[in-house]
Image (tube, helix red, strand yellow):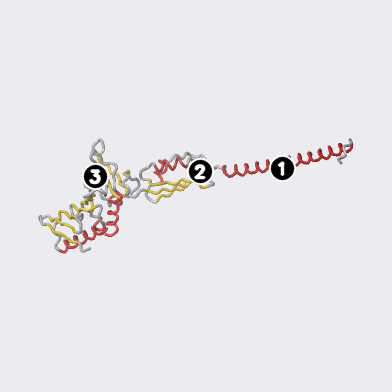
Amino acid sequence: SRVNSPQARKRRQKRWLKLLSMLAVAAVVLGGILWGGWLLSQQRETIQIAPPSKPIERVLFDTDGVLPDAWLGATVDLRPGMSMMQADIHGLKQALESEAQVKSASVERVFPSDLRIVIAERQPAMRLAIETADGSRRQRIVARDGTVYDGIGYPKATLKNLPFVQPYQNVDGSFFPLRGIERVSELLELVRNHEPKVFRTWQVVSLEHYSGDLKLPGQVIEVRSAIVPRILFSASADFARQLDRLTYILEYVKNQGNPSIERIDLSLRGSAAVQFSSGRVGSYQSTH
């Protein structure tokens, strides 16, 4: 039986008080450990997200094209003395990519004090002559993807080697946006790489009969060159085969004394038609 004398009750009270005291001490110790750990994690996080911010000392600019350093200085807003963390890298990226000649841009901080800007530029395919409101003519560049831009930094020799383009006119009378230029660029690249002498004679690429929609029948890309006034390519047929026919015809005509040619139509299926200045028409039948 449990003793319930006054002395026994006092002993039990002392034991409970001692136990409660030990629990209280343990709770304080545990709370201190948790609090210290939290403070330490906050301190580490602060160190990670707030590195020392020095003034920008160098801008490391790199491009795969021709844009000069002066263009960069006029395009982005980097004030003297601006710190690394003050530079709005997302805003700078947007400002750079708003320029039509820029295909993509990356901007990153290189601590402790450098800013790296890397540009990928659009590749020029053709030139476009535009008449301004005052009647003067202005030259612009057409990229491989059809983007039209001013063209900054290109050597004169590079521009001289680009043929002009005569755009397709839409039903509403407009010329823009230019559609299907990727397909035209494939033709130009093929001829430039495989028949550079022929390519250098090309002066104008007419898209009068090429809307850019390859699903429509009769889509023709017309080239006006220094040696043949009109060369017609089917936009939907294999360009390599059409180029083979063209080079064969030019070589054949050369061996025949170079009679003057008015037109070579390569858009016919399996054959090509040659119209001479004399009025005579010849044909070339493909063997493949």
Instruction: Give percent across and percent down for residue 252.
Output: 17, 63
Callout 1 secondary element: helix
Total numbered badges shown on the rendered structure: 3
**Relative to 32, 125 lies left or right:** left
Amino acid at the residue labelled 2? Ile
Instruction: Give percent across and percent down for residue 88.
Output: 48, 40
Disc with the residue nearer the chain's start (2 vs 1)? 1
Residue denoted by label 3: 168
**Relative to 15, 108 lies left or right:** left
Residue 81 can be seen in this image: no
Count residues near mark 1 (Cα–Cα under 10 Å), then give few for <14, some for 14-19, many for 20+.
few
Amino acid at the residue labelled 3? Tyr
Instruction: Give percent across and percent down for residue 180.
Output: 29, 48
Q: Quadrant of the C terminus?
A: bottom left
Residue denoted by label 1: 30
The answer to which of 217 and 253 lies nearer the viewer is 217
What's the residue at 25%, 55% (across, down)? Answer: 237
Using the image, tell me which numbered label, if any, was put on residue 56. Answer: 2
**Relative to 284, 133 lies left or right:** right
Find the distance from the CA under tag 2 to the CA under tag 3: 48 Å
